[in-house]
Image (tube, rainbow, N blue to C red):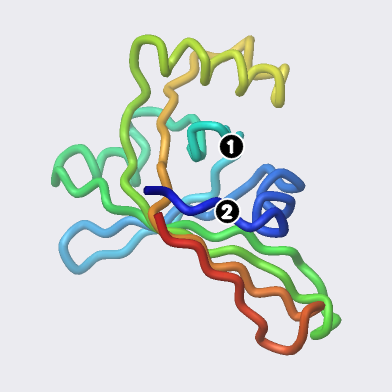
Amino acid sequence: MNHPIDKRILSLIHQHHIFTLAITRGLQPWCATCFYVYDEERNLFIFTSEDDTRHIRDAVETGNFLTAGAIAVETKMIGKIRGIQFSGIMHRLEEEELKTATKQYIKKFPIARFSTLYLWGINPDMIKMTDNRLGFGRKLIWHS
């Protein structure tokens, strides 16, 4: 049974559109910055990335689709620091899931309709949000 995700976590996810994606190939970590759309109903981060990018190539060639990501709010004020870290399994979107995701992605990023989209999804299994506005180092944690 999935537990509901705290509305404060969802709010931060919806307020932003770029995450840092982290993968590993053997002992070699790699990060990529990706534009995303979040489908709350399916608990799915949607992003586009071509097959020849290092992060996609590394995942596909090794079969290791375990990933982690981060969304950060940039501020110099310690009391306003907020951010999200998540983990999950990345997968290429296909068929009906792809059709729905394409519409969502183009709605958020209209310029994307002029590009070929290579859509991927991540269903997070854990999300941790740090929100210093709630108290220094305060964490909100969700698990699937």
Residue 132 visible here? yes
Residue type at the position of mark 1: Glu
Q: Is residue 126 above or below residue 76?
A: above
Label 2: element kind:
loop
The image shows residue 39 at horizontal and vertical percentages of 57, 33
> Residue beneath label 2, please?
5
Q: Residues within 10 Å of mark 2 (few under 14, many from 20)?
A: some
In the rendered image, which quarter is residue 60 located in? top left
Q: Quadrant of the C terminus?
A: bottom left
Residue 99 lies left or right of residue 17; in this view the side is: left
In the depicted structure, whether residue 58 falls above or below residue 96: below
Asked whether disc 1 touches disc 2, contact meaning CB atoms under 8 Å apart, the reply is yes
Give 52 or 80, whichever is nearer the viewer.
80
Tell me the residue at 81%/72% (across/down).
Answer: 75
Identify residue for label 1.
Answer: 40
Q: Nearer the viewer, residue 94 or 62?
A: 94
Residue located 42% across and 18% down the image: 97
User: Which of label 1 and label 2 is nearer to you?
Assistant: 2
Image spot of residue 88 (x, y percent): 36, 52
Is 126 left, or right, of 131 in this rendering? left
